[in-house]
């Protein structure tokens, strides 16, 4: 069984509107997924612990505890992939969700097949990451990277990475010494539908530089090829 197949994969739908949950359940079950539900953030946290879903589709606008706060608490105990659902399309909202550890973002109203496509894409990327574990990478005396634990060690201090930072750094390091075009980075880290979200990429490059560079204003590890893309220092030679 692979993560690209929908057979027996369990999807948790989190939405305070029963009608929305029924519609999403119906469409996902037609595609062969097993579907479980939660009406609020508190119930969602319980369902993740008890039922171990393969992926969570979670609405942002919920009473008592919104999707952002639920996601923040969820990421303290689980790395399950999460797709956030919102009525807003602002880049700042997407950044907030992705920054908290969301794997993708979809805006209402959406075509049911678009949600299915996003779910399959996120599951595919999750499977690729799970098979990419490798030993500790020592870039130089000041920087080491452990992709399995999603953390870096800078001058002896251990720093944890957000999930999105982890994916971005992974693809940069895997292509060390080569320029990776912006569109390709966006597609690999966030998905093909984000190819033109250059502002989002710049934000996360800044986050990474602030965590790993001795002087973020004069980067040693992550270089920018203006108008083209980014490259990671060639530490292999």
Image: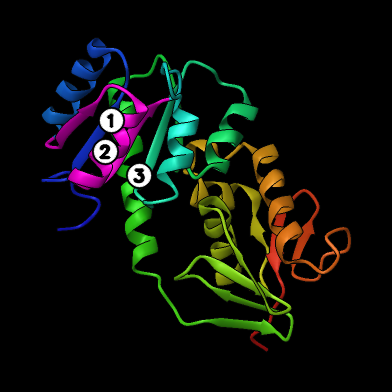
Sequence-first tag of 1 and 3: 1
Res 175 visible? no
Q: Nearer the viewer, residue 11 or 173?
A: 11
From this view, report whether residue 65 is shown above or below residue 219: above
Mark 2 Cα shell of 10 Å, populated few (<14), some (14-19), many (≥20): few
Question: CA separation, marks 2 and 3?
Answer: 25 Å
Q: Residue at x 39, y 35 (%)?
A: 83
Q: Say the numbered circle drawn on residue 46.
A: 2
Say left or right for 197 vs 80. right
Q: Quadrant of residue 159?
A: bottom right
Task: Pick the quarter of the image with the C terminus.
Answer: bottom right
Closer to us: 13 or 123: 13
Q: Is residue 32 left or right of residue 41?
A: left
Residue visible at 45% across and 18% down?
A: 61
- Identify residue for label 3: 121
According to the picture, the residue beneath numbered tag 1 turns out to be 43
Seen from the viewer's position, the closer of residues 83 and 192 is 83
């Amino acid at each position: 069984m692979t993560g690209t197949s929908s057979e027996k994969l369990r999807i948790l739908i989190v939405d305070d509107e029963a009608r929305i949950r029924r519609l999403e359940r119906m469409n996902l079950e037609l595609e062969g997924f097993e579907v479980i539900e939660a009406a609020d953030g508190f119930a969602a946290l319980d369902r993740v612990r008890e039922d171990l879903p393969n992926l969570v589709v979670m609405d942002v606008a919920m009473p008592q505890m919104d999707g952002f706060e639920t996601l923040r608490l969820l990421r303290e105990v689980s790395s399950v992939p999460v797709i956030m659902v919102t009525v807003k399309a602002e880049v700042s909202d997407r950044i907030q969700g992705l920054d908290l550890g969301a794997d993708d973002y979809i805006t209402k109203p959406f075509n049911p097949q678009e949600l299915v496509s996003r779910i399959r894409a996120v599951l595919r990327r999750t499977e690729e990451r799970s098979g990419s574990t490798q030993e500790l990478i020592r870039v130089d005396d000041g920087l080491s990277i452990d992709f399995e634990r999603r953390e870096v060690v800078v001058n002896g201090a251990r720093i944890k990475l957000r999930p999105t930072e982890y994916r971005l750094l992974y693809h940069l390091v895997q292509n060390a010494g080569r320029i990776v075009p912006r569109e390709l980075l966006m597609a690999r880290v966030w998905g093909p539908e984000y190819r033109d979200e250059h502002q989002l990429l710049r934000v996360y490059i800044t986050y990474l530089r602030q965590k790993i560079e001795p002087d973020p204003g004069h980067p040693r590890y992550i270089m920018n090829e203006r108008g083209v893309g980014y490259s990671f220092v060639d530490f292999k030679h």
